[in-house]
Image (tube, grey):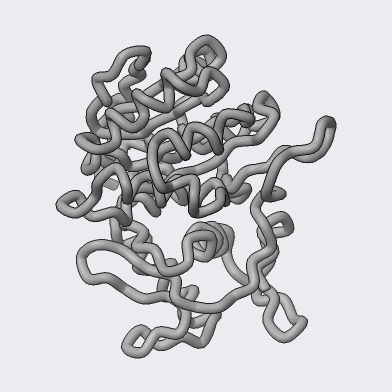
Amino acid sequence: MLDIANAQLIRQGQPVELPPKSFALLAYLAQRPGELVLKDTLLDVVWGRRFVSEGAVKTVVSELRAALRDDARAPLWIETVQRRGYRFVGRLQPLPFLRRGRCRPGGDPCGNLPLSLTPAIAREAEGAALDTLLANHRLVTLTGAAGVGKTRLALSRALARRTDYADGAWLLELAPLAADTCDEATLRATLASALQLDSAAAAANDALVRALRPMTLLLVVDNAEHVLRPLAPLLAHLHVQLPQLHLLVTSREPLHIPGEHVLRLAPLSVPAPEWTTTWPD
């Protein structure tokens, strides 16, 4: 069992000791069973991509495999997808990250955001700017190069603001979708699944609008750059038809649709090296 709220992995009634980064990575993968999670996404979410290489992901996955008694050659828990990322293939029983379903007035916030995030490092100014945009606009796109921390910043601010939305804050992860086969039907089905809607909601754009119309929620659309062609018109339609839907998109490029407000995330500056002078005896 994976207890997200208390950061515990429990096997046969006994807690399994895991370092914080290992637990965070396991929690993120376990929330997305069967989905390919890119290495860049894990670097963003777990480390904030600050001076960390892909080797850190490999090290943590090795720690997890040792703790789970998993074999990389015949994985029961974490499968490696060469040169791309990892896929959770086990059958852990995760406790929910947040309560699912519609929120009751005065009750706990709902959604599917991971609770194991640490704050985005050295992004206080950008976080404040993003908060201002989210408070005043319903469609915000966070852009920037790969690995600058878009996912971490978006999720951390969405998590902090989730109580602002009666139906919570939800994550739509697009990285596993293939650019060459993704279309609006695929996106509708993926969105309906992420929001735990009935499959009939994915039949057409109008059906999706009807299902979402009673809801007030924040939808974080993550890793959108490779499916912008089908995604942009779908989000434009939802944005116009659903005045209580709030969208936060992370992408390397903007959507270029009406109502979009863009915040560009620049790379963090690298600190100057520390020099040590050794004087001769």
Any part of residue 212 in sight = yes
Q: Residue 92: name its quadrant.
A: bottom right
- The answer to whether 172 appears left or right of 161 in the picture is left
Q: Residue at x 66, y 76 (%)?
A: 16
Depicted 119 relative to depicted 179: above or below: above
Residue pushed farthest right?
106
* Picture residue at 23% right of the left edge, 29% below the top: 253
Name the side, left or right, on which 131 lies relative to 222. Answer: right
The residue that appears at 47% across and 38% down in the rendered structure is 208
Q: Nearer the viewer, residue 33 or 126?
A: 33
Rendering coords of residue 190 (x, y %): 41, 51
User: In x, y percent, where is residue 133?
Assistant: 48, 14
Q: Position of residue 65 (x, y in %)?
A: 46, 79
Residue 11 percent location from the top left of the image: 68, 81
Question: Could you say which is closer to the camera, residue 60 or residue 236?
Answer: 236
Q: Is residue 46 left or right of residue 81?
A: right
Q: Determine the residue located farthest toward the top in the rendered image.
A: 136
Seen from the viewer's position, the closer of residues 224 and 45 is 224
Q: Is residue 234 left or right of residue 193?
A: left
Q: Is residue 271 visible?
A: no
Count of numbered marks? 0
Q: Dividing the picture into quarters, in which one does residue 102 lie?
A: top right
Task: Report which quarter residue 5 is drawn in.
Answer: bottom right
